[in-house]
Amino acid sequence: MEFISAEKIKKIIKIKGLINEIENIYRSDSFVPLRQVYNIIPQNNAAQMMVMPAFSIDGYYGVKLLNVFPNNPLVGLPRVKALYVLYEQKNGEIKLILDGTEITKQRTAAMSAIASKFLSKIDSKTLLVIGTGALVSYMINAHCSVRSIDNVLIWGRNINKVKNIVKIYKNSNLNVSAIDSLQEACGIADIITSVTSAKKEFIKGSWLNNSAHIDLLGAHTRDMAELDPYGFSLGEIYVDDKEAALIEAGDLMQSIKLGYISKNDIKADIKQLIISNDFKRDEKDKVTIYKSVGHALSDLATANYIYKVLNLS
């Protein structure tokens, strides 16, 4: 059984093709159990293993085994390590074993772009990326595939990492620049995507302009946060998976706990957006919020996409 490496996955995946595959699988019948989260060291919930299965009627099912070690970057190791196994539904045969970390990066960016396609202004031109980790380039590529982005602003606490990201795009068609003031950036950005591992909220709702779409991908456990509790009360809230978000999305949970919003303020999940043929953003000024904690069906769609490409080549 061939192992599909991260480098091979990068060569195979075309973002628009992946977005199409994800949308197709979300339109079909599927079963996605709530993921199981285990503390690797029982007394310390910092390091965790997640088991994320998903089943679809298209003939395949799969599971991702994902390990999160928050302190790994301090010693030069990746924060997330994962493995994905794709199975044949009719007989349980293993069809592919893939680098699950790369699967996670690709599907996270694609899901973010799908949400943006539905929720951001059609004429969005300025993208703000908050964070300096491995997902930055994926997010830029994905959002540029669904909106005609001209300007990309990068903000992060480590200015040297920000400058290195800007250098990568020096000869590209995009105007990519570092920005010192996060408050200023939030005030001018059409789309804001936050991909951090922050434990305490640092984006203030009062900074958002009144037509921004904000994409929150970092706070995927109950002890993490990116947007302050007040910020969630300013716009329409959408999630990748409502059940998981209500027990895992730290900043969303805090906003509910403090009474800024209720769970009924979550307007829809990503599947509802995709299958709703008549959904269209009202172009009047309003804030839209997409909160993601990670959804196993998008992992399965990504593995399916790779399997199809490999069998057609």
Image: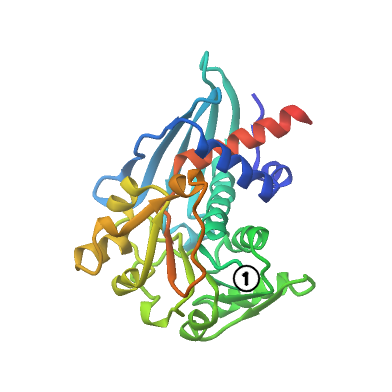
Quadrant occupied by the N terminus? top right
Residue 144 lies left or right of residue 158; in this view the side is: right
Q: Residues within 10 Å of mark 1 (few under 14, many from 20)?
A: few
Q: Residue furthest top?
A: 91
Residue 63 position in % (x across, y down): 47, 32
**What residue is rendered at 31% in x and 61% in y?**
252
**What residue is rendered at 26% in x and 56% in y?**
263
Residue 17 position in % (x across, y down): 68, 44
Residue 311 lies left or right of residue 216; in this view the side is: right
Q: Nearer the viewer, residue 148 or 291?
A: 148
Residue 81 position in % (x across, y down): 50, 46
Residue 234: name its quadrant.
bottom left
Quadrant occupied by the C terminus? top right
Q: Identify residue for label 1.
A: 123
Residue 68 position in % (x across, y down): 42, 50
As drawn, 147 above or below 306: below
Tally of numbered tags: 1
Residue 168 lies left or right of residue 205; in this view the side is: right
**Residue type beneath disc 1:** Asp
* Residue 77 seen: no
Residue 98: name its quadrant.
top right
